[in-house]
Image (cartoon, helix red, strand yellow):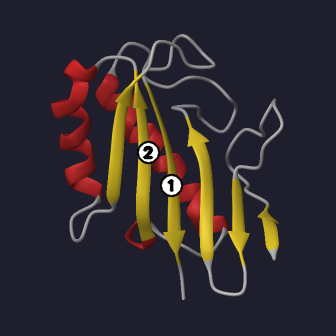
Amino acid sequence: MKEVVPVKGLPQPKGVWSIVTRARPGNLVFVSGLLSKDENGEIVGVGDITAQTEQVIANLKTALAAAGATLEDIVRVDVYIKDMSHFDKIHAVRRKHFVKDPPASTMVEISRMTDDRCLIEINAIAVTQ
């Protein structure tokens, strides 16, 4: 059974998707791709991959919390970036937040995002008890 989880503290999608869904029985949590938007929908850290990565991870925390999960529950992330030369800076931020047993991950460089000011987007799958 699929459940859409309401998330407070993040801007609501303008398109057709849910920020977080959960699959039951079991507790799989699926978080849609998140950008570096604050709760008002404004882009944080324009031109700064470190600031944008920090904001995206903060947004992941908010989205996961709505489903009763944390960063430690993430089993997989997909990371979309506009410039692969940012790899080391992105992973410096990730190292701070995924201290133990980091999730499986795919990172790909793409040409465009839904907002041209964004440098990174991350989606996630988590498992909770």
Residue 13 spot, x, y in % from top left? 77, 37
Q: Is residue 76 above or below residue 15?
A: below
**Image disc number at residue 78:** 2
Number of numbered callouts drawn: 2
Q: Residue at x 37, y 40 (%)?
A: 54
Taking depth in this image into account, of 70 and 129 the one nearest to the observer is 129
* Helix, strand or loop under label 1: strand
Three-letter code for the amino acid on which mark 2 is drawn: Asp
89 relative to 121 in the view: left or right: left
Q: Residue at x 52, y 14 (%)?
A: 112
**Image disc number at residue 124:** 1
Three-letter code for the amino acid on which mark 1 is drawn: Ala
Quadrant for the N terminus in the image: bottom right
Q: Residue at x 54, y 47 (%)?
A: 59
Which of the 4 quarters of the picture holds residue 69? Answer: bottom right
Q: Are marks 2 and 1 in contact (CB under 8 Å)?
A: yes
Q: Residue at x 26, y 22 (%)?
A: 84
Label 2 vs 1, first from the N-terminus = 2
* Helix, strand or loop under label 2: strand
Which of the 4 quarters of the picture holds residue 23? Answer: bottom right
**Image disc number at residue 105:** none
Residue 128 spot, x, y in % from top left? 53, 81
Q: Disc 2 versus disc 1: distance between alpha carbons?
A: 7 Å
Q: Is residue 71 above or below residue 52?
A: below
